[in-house]
Image (cartoon, rainbow, N blue to C red):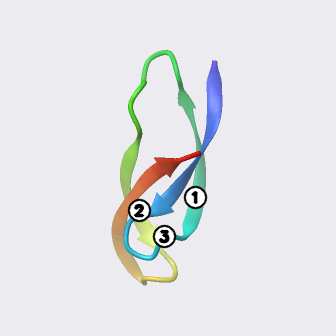
Amino acid sequence: MREIITLQCGDCKNRNYTSTKNKKKNQDRLELKKFCRTCRHHTVHKEVK
């Protein structure tokens, strides 16, 4: 079963992206390096509820 997750910027704490993830295969929180529009550079985005 796939669930919708929200990705939050590690620097400015803005919630910029949404994505889906398979909860059965990936139990831990997702971390991706993506572009933040408010910081104007690539930062680590972490999964939040």
Q: Give percent across and percent down for residue 11.
A: 38, 73
Three-letter amino acid code at disc 2? Answer: Lys
SS at mark 2? strand
Crowding around mark 3 (Cα neighbors within 10 Å: few <14, some 14 to 19, many 20+) is: few
Q: Residue at x 44, y 17 (%)?
A: 25
Q: Is residue 34 left or right of residue 16?
A: left
Structural distance between the alpha carbons of marks 2 and 3: 13 Å
- Residue at (62, 25) in percent of width and height: 2
Q: Is 7 left, or right, of 33 in this rendering?
A: right
Q: As rendered, which of 41 and 7 lies closer to the eye?
A: 7
The quadrant of the rendering that contains the N terminus is: top right
Which residue does the image show at 42% across and 52% down from the upper left?
A: 46
Say if 28 sits above or below 10 in the image.
Answer: above
Q: Are marks 1 and 2 in contact (CB under 8 Å)?
A: yes
Nearest to the eye among marks 3 and 1: give it: 3
Q: Could you tell me the amino acid type at mark 1?
A: Tyr
Q: Residue at x 64, y 31 (%)?
A: 3
Q: Mark 2 or mark 3: which is in front?
A: 3
First in sequence: mark 1 or mark 2? 1
- Location of residue 15 by image quarter: bottom right
Q: CA distance from mark 1 to mark 2?
A: 9 Å
Question: Circle 3 sits on which residue?
Answer: 13
- Mark seen at residue 41: none
**Residue topped by disc 2:** 34
Task: From the top left corner, tell me how far across and down residue 7 is, in percent.
Answer: 52, 54
Going by the numbered disc 3, the residue's amino acid type is Lys
Q: Which badge, 2 or 3, is on the more N-terminal residue? A: 3
Pointer 1 residue? 17
